[in-house]
Amino acid sequence: MLSRTGGWAVIRKAIFILLLPLSGVAHAASSTISPVDGSTVAVRGTVYVNLVSTFSKTNPGYVQFASTPAVSIQQDGPLNVTYVPPANNIPVQLLFSQTGLTQGNQVAWTDAIAYKVPEGYNFSGALFDAVGSNNSLLVRAVIKTQLAVFNSSTSAGHFSTGTVLSLPYFATQIWADVSSGTFSVNPDILTITYTNQAGVAGKTTTVTIPKNATVGSDIAVPLATGDYGVLAITGVTHTVTEQGQTTLNGTSELVYMSCPSGGVPVLVSLPLNTIAVLTGQTIYMQYNLTGGAQTLRESLIGILTPH
């Protein structure tokens, strides 16, 4: 039985009745099933617990939000299994609310909140909502990982490698974020060498850091045709000397939402386990003020589950 409280789903209690087929099996008011044709004698309680375990493994949503099932064994009749929310699950709300927000012309996404999932827990999203005072607001939540840093202050530039991701996880986008200095004289074209989602190294792509890009500017980096992810950035070259530094981040969108009408909240209810962020990963809530300066509220509600 599922109930909704405060706009998001909380598993309160689920009762499943599993009926053990006993056709051809003689049994009396005891805790054992008699052997038939040489079959092994099994304790009814053990059989039922195995059934519950099999059910749980094939329905991971119940494992995520439920403690070890409490099994009620009767001499005859149905098996009652009760799931209750374990006390060590922790509800979390990531909330950003601010008035008078503005955004630079070369800024696609601004970080509102950065939240690192604590060690020993995984995060599962349940509800994402947002509202802005003007039209045409974009919001999203992403996992962002620093893959490399490139400094354009010399003719060769200075490349520093970052995190190398491991399959099955990979980032779905690369963003070039100006992290220090300026590009005040000329645009700088970066040629980026990376390893794609299949582990193929030596793939290349280019991105232009525009003239007058300042700290906070972020530019989407296209991947090579046929690629849809990246594991690592292994090298960067560039065309001109500038005094800016670019951080190359890998991102994976957890949820993306448009709020087309000012003052009208938009929300997305997330089915169990569709958004799972692992221990040590960082969630960034971001916004794009396509409609100009405005007041913004965005919220991501979820649960921390021990693992």
Image (tube, rainbow, N blue to C red):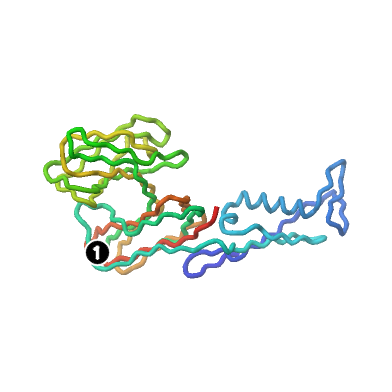
Question: With respect to residue 236, does 74 lie above or below?
Answer: below
Q: Residue at x 50, y 58 (%)?
A: 304
Residue 1 falls left or right of residue 184 = right
Q: Up-down: is 2 above or below 251? A: below
Amino acid at circle 1: Leu
Q: Where residue 291 appears, x then y in whole percent? A: 24, 61
Q: From this view, report whether residue 141 is shown above or below residue 225.
A: below
What residue is shown at x 24% (from left), y 52% (from top)? 216
Judge left or right: residue 59 versus residue 273.
right
Could you tell me residue 294's position as x and y percent?
A: 25, 66
Tell me the residue at 20%/33% (across/down): 156
Residue 39 is situated, as x and y percent measured from the top left of the image, at 84, 42
Residue most toward the left?
A: 185
Residue 165 makes an appearance in the image: yes
Between 174 and 1, the one lying in front of the other is 174
Q: Residues within 10 Å of mark 1 (few under 14, many from 20)?
A: few
Mark 1 lies on a secondary structure that is strand
Which residue is disc 1 drawn over?
Answer: 101
Which residue is at 65% across, 57% downward?
68
Q: Quadrant of the N terminus?
A: bottom right
User: Could you tell me residue 278's position as x and y percent?
Assistant: 47, 50
Q: Nearer the viewer, residue 18 or 65?
A: 65
- Numbered-mark total: 1
Quadrant housing residue 75: bottom right
